[in-house]
Amino acid sequence: MLSRRKPLKRNVFLFVLLLVLMPALAWAAVVADSHFNALNEGGFNCYGSNGASVSIASGTGTPDAPNALKIIFPSGFVAGNYPMECSAPSYNSNEIYRQVYVMFPVGYQHYSDGGTGGADKIAYDYLDSNNWADNPGNFATIVWNWGNHPNGKPDWGWQPYGIMILLQPNSSGLPQRNLYPNQPGAIGMVDGVWYKLSWYVKLNTSGSANGIARAWINDVLQFEYTDVELRKNGGGAESNWGTRNFWLSNLLPIWGGHGETKDQSDFFYMDHAIVSTTPIGGGSTDALQKEPNPPNSLIIK
């Protein structure tokens, strides 16, 4: 009888060990995760560009205290350029989960495209590429200034900004596409307040518009699309583009697109950025993304 009980004890031990390791395993697919206590932290490497700079700042009121990333523009900064980049390691996945906190201080000069609405880009996610000439596409996550945009503005009252995604496929026959908020509970953003931006994109199968894109502000769903098409096999150099996965992600806050310059020295903040190939927090793709916790208690009968 005793010999028969030994395998059971061993199995119980392995089960307990697995439960203890579950929080660590849930983070096994995290590509980068930085609280920005340093410019090079958690897989992100941040540096200034185009005459602008980036630094670590305290006293910002970030929900992820004590420090945040400060992106600093000089007066005269030209639209269409990026003031800094935070690069992350390469990976290979057909879906990507992202998070970053942002805060634009009161008085920040948003790009307006002549008052018709404009883009403060936040981040890019790229499909696998051997070089930039062989680039199946990417998408940009954007804080959009609606202004008097001809597409109209969601019913956010006086709150002028929201999150959107710009799909930029390079496969022949696939057009660019803007994914705007489409949920009744969508909320807007105002200057001087910290917001958590999260997004999830799953690539389509080649030739089918069956990809998925979702985005949240403060864990409130802003949009959901299930007809996303970002890759497709084609002729010549595009023969395998329909099977290329996500490969590279960054923080790349390109200011606007063209035709404007910064009228003032300016800055805004980012904090706690995450790139992951599994749900942030280990939940489902529909779940709010929260960090995993170990079990509070364990009872084995």
Image (cartoon, helix red, strand yellow):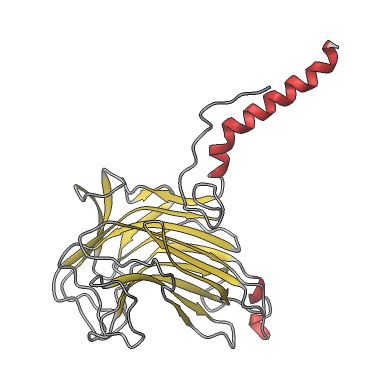
**Residue at left 47%, top 72%?**
139
Residue 288 is left or right of residue 85, and the answer is right
Residue 77 percent across, percent down from the top left = 21, 75
98, 147: nearer the viewer: 147
User: In the rendered image, which quarter is residue 227 located in?
Assistant: bottom right
Q: Quadrant of residue 180?
A: bottom left
Instruction: Name the side, left or right, on which 263 lies relative to 103.
Output: left
Question: Which residue occupies the extreme top position in the image?
Answer: 2
Q: The C terminus lies in which quarter of the figure? A: top right
- Residue 30 image offset from top left, x and y in percent: 51, 50
Asked if residue 165 is positioned above or below residue 99 in the image, the reply reads: below
Vertical side of 270 occupied by 28: above or below? above
Numbered circles on residues, count:
0
Residue 123 shown left or right of residue 149 in the figure = right
- Residue 172 position in % (x across, y down): 59, 87
User: Which residue shows up at 62% across the image and 70% down it?
Assistant: 244
Picture coordinates of residue 84, whole percent (x, y): 31, 64
Nearer to the camera, 180 or 59: 180
Please tell me which residue is depicted at 66% across the width and 84% down the height of the picture: 234
- Whether residue 34 sits left or right of residue 117 in the image: it is right
Picture quarter with the N terminus: top right
